[in-house]
Image (cartoon, rainbow, N blue to C red):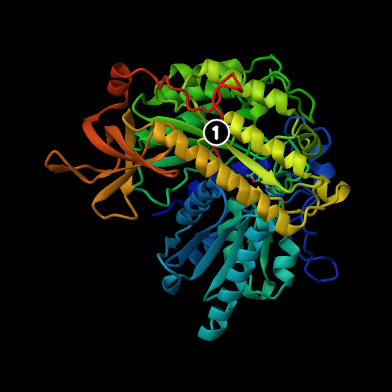
């Protein structure tokens, strides 16, 4: 079932990976005998100072992971774990890493709460609303524990991920029945933390690492039958946008060695996976410093873009990784998220344009259309530089679909600033937008230095207005697709209609097709050439033309020539009608 020796080796190997943040393992006893908890969240200086420095060896006194002993392994046997995942795709993949570690220690998966001995909530801290949901969930579990009369060893509640990192102390002290707290770099420790005796209090491990990439942990997929999978290629963020908590919860940027990424993609391909999404907080800032392919070249940022950190040099860059991943299996689609607009040199755009299996769909999170607000956010670009990048991307990758994130009501955002955001949205014409009301996060620069002066109702009004605009644009873009032939990868039954399947086109737009075609059922994981017959702002409807392969489709069809844009280069050409 599991190999104690293998796991022991795994944990010993990672000893070097753990270096100190301000956080220390909480479960160590202070000299007074009282448990010492790390203060909530690491500090700003920890991430800014020497941000271009290579990973350091562990300082003296840094806590090292204890190899699993008989107690930990015995503890896992027969126990069932339920995962409840909140937040981004990174959290889904992190859950798969945590699950891999626990499975090796003998744990089994619970399908629902009634059969669970342990429930782990993978958490998100990005906005207050995300955290509120998790506090409510914890209250529910606490009530459940009380109603069933469970002791701590019968039913444990663990908080994993960003909120664990940010609120470690509050989670333990809040009396919401939390037994375990583990941050994003602490999943190797889960078996040990779970085996900790009940009377030692909550088990806490929240030390951030400069090296941890879980490169040697094979994630176990939560849905092993899905034709699409995630592969994390880098972790952390060095950008320090003034609104964002991520650098504090996920730590500094570090990339996984290229060979280990390629190996995992190869394994997924052998398992029949047809689409991989490469993941990272700044996925295109990928830089593998581990291997022989290191180049001395400094990073070339997109024109008009800057960073808060010193230029980084050396390492294998994202374009090389993307190309190597695309080579693994020409029948496997490759996507990536979430990138930062600064890291789109021409090498990356060329790989996207030239490889039929790298999807022509780019997430370019703009956040705002006002240069003044962008400066306050420390995004490192102006509205003009962003729009120039969009034009450049469209020249190099004709037909590319663009998506974005926007924040409404950031500190000091005036109505005029907001109008600039709406006009940027119109000018670009996004296929999809993620829209957020600004949420003030402790420890960020905006929290310290700027005033959160847009009233909540006004933030909501602005989000609603952006949503109206975005939906109208998406409707327009999708309607233009009617009559075209597109390659669709079928994913799963349509949640709305049992007689239909849901798939996605190259631009990642959902496409609904009939389940039966030419007298036989279609299946998840198949590529189908589809004629688009109808469109709403969210989905396309289509008629299957033939079962096909990615390469066959690429040979027969030119890449989309009608650009997925509303205005193109000429702002006068075609206004979005909303
Ligand atoms: N408030 C609102 N939205 C935020 N985001 C990040 N931090 C905040 C915040 N404090 C949004 C950004 C980012 C996306 C993942 O979440 O748009 O790109
Ligand atoms: Fe949320 Fe960001 Fe953490 Fe993902 S990385 S879970 S979006 S705070």
Residue 271 lies, in percent from the top left, at 33, 39
Q: Residue at x 47, y 64 (%)?
A: 81
Determine whether 323 is above or below 247 in the image. Answer: above
Residue 228 lies, in percent from the top left, at 39, 41
Q: Nearer the viewer, residue 486 or 180?
A: 486
Question: What is the quadrant of residue 173 in the picture?
Answer: bottom right
Q: Residue at x 51, y 27 (%)?
A: 565
* Count of numbered circles in the view: 1
Confirm whether residue 252 shows in the render: no
Pointer 1 local density, CA inside 10 Å: few below 14, some 14–19, many at least 20: some
Quadrant (top left/top right/bottom left/bottom right) for the N terminus: bottom left
Look at mark 1 in the image and give the residue it sits on. 576
Q: Nearer the viewer, residue 542 or 552?
A: 542
Residue 432 lies, in percent from the top left, at 52, 39
Q: Residue at x 60, y 22 (%)?
A: 572
Residue 569 lies, in percent from the top left, at 58, 19
Q: Residue at x 47, y 43 (%)?
A: 218
């Amino acid at each position: 079932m599991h190999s104690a020796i293998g796991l022991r080796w795994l944990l010993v190997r990672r000893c070097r990976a753990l270096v100190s943040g301000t956080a220390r393992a909480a479960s160590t006893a202070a000299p007074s005998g009282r448990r010492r908890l790390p203060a909530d969240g690491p500090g700003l200086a920890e991430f800014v100072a020497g941000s271009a420095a290579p990973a350091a060896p562990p300082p003296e006194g840094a806590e090292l992971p204890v190899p699993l002993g008989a107690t930990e392994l015995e503890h896992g046997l027969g126990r069932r774990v339920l995962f409840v995942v909140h937040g981004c795709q990174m959290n889904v993949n992190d859950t798969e890493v945590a699950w891999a570690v626990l499975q090796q220690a003998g744990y089994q998966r619970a399908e629902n709460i009634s059969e669970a001995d342990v429930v782990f909530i993978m958490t998100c801290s990005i906005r207050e609303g995300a955290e509120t949901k998790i506090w409510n969930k914890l209250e529910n579990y606490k009530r459940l524990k009380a109603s069933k009369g469970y002791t701590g060893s019968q039913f444990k509640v663990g908080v994993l991920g960003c909120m664990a990192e940010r609120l470690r102390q509050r989670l333990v002290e809040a009396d919401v029945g939390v037994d375990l707290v583990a941050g994003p770099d602490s999943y190797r420790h889960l078996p040990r933390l779970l085996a900790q005796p009940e009377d030692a209090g909550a088990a806490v491990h929240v030390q951030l690492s400069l090296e941890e990439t879980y490169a040697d942990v094979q994630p176990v997929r939560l849905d092993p039958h899905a034709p699409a999978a995630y592969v994390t290629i880098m972790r952390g963020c060095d950008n320090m946008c003034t609104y964002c908590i991520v650098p504090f919860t996920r730590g500094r940027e570090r990339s996984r060695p290229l060979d280990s990424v390629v190996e995992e993609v190869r394994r997924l391909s052998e398992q029949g996976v047809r689409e991989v999404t490469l993941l990272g907080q700044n996925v295109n800032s990928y830089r593998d410093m581990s291997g022989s392919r290191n180049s001395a070249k400094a990073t070339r940022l997109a024109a008009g873009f800057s960073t808060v950190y010193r230029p980084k040099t050396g390492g294998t860059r994202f374009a090389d990784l993307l190309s190597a991943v695309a080579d693994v299996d020409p029948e496997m689609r490759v996507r990536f998220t979430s990138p930062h607009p600064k890291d789109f040199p021409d090498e990356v755009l060329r790989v996207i344009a030239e490889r039929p299996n790298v999807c022509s769909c780019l997430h370019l999170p703009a956040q705002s259309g006002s240069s003044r607000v962008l400066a306050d956010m420390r995004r490192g670009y102006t509205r003009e530089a962003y729009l120039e990048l969009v034009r450049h991307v469209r020249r190099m990758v004709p037909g590319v679909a663009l998506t974005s994130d926007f924040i409404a009501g950031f500190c000091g955002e005036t109505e005029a600033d907001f109008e600039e955001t709406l006009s940027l949205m119109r000018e670009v014409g996004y296929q999809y937008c993620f829209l957020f009301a600004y949420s003030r996060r402790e420890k960020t620069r905006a929290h310290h230095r700027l005033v959160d002066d847009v009233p909540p109702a006004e933030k909501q009004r602005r989000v609603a207005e952006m949503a109206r605009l975005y939906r109208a644009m998406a409707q327009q873009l999708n309607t233009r697709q009617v009559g075209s032939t597109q390659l669709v990868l079928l994913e799963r039954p349509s949640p709305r209609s049992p007689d239909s399947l849901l798939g996605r086109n190259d631009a990642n737009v959902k496409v609904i097709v009939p389940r039966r075609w030419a007298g036989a059922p279609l299946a998840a994981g198949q590529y189908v050439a589809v004629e688009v017959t109808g469109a709403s702002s969210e989905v396309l409807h289509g008629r299957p033309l033939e079962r096909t392969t990615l390469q066959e489709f690429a040979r027969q069809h030119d890449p989309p020539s009608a650009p997925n844009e509303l205005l193109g280069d000429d702002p006068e050409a075609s206004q979005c009608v909303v």
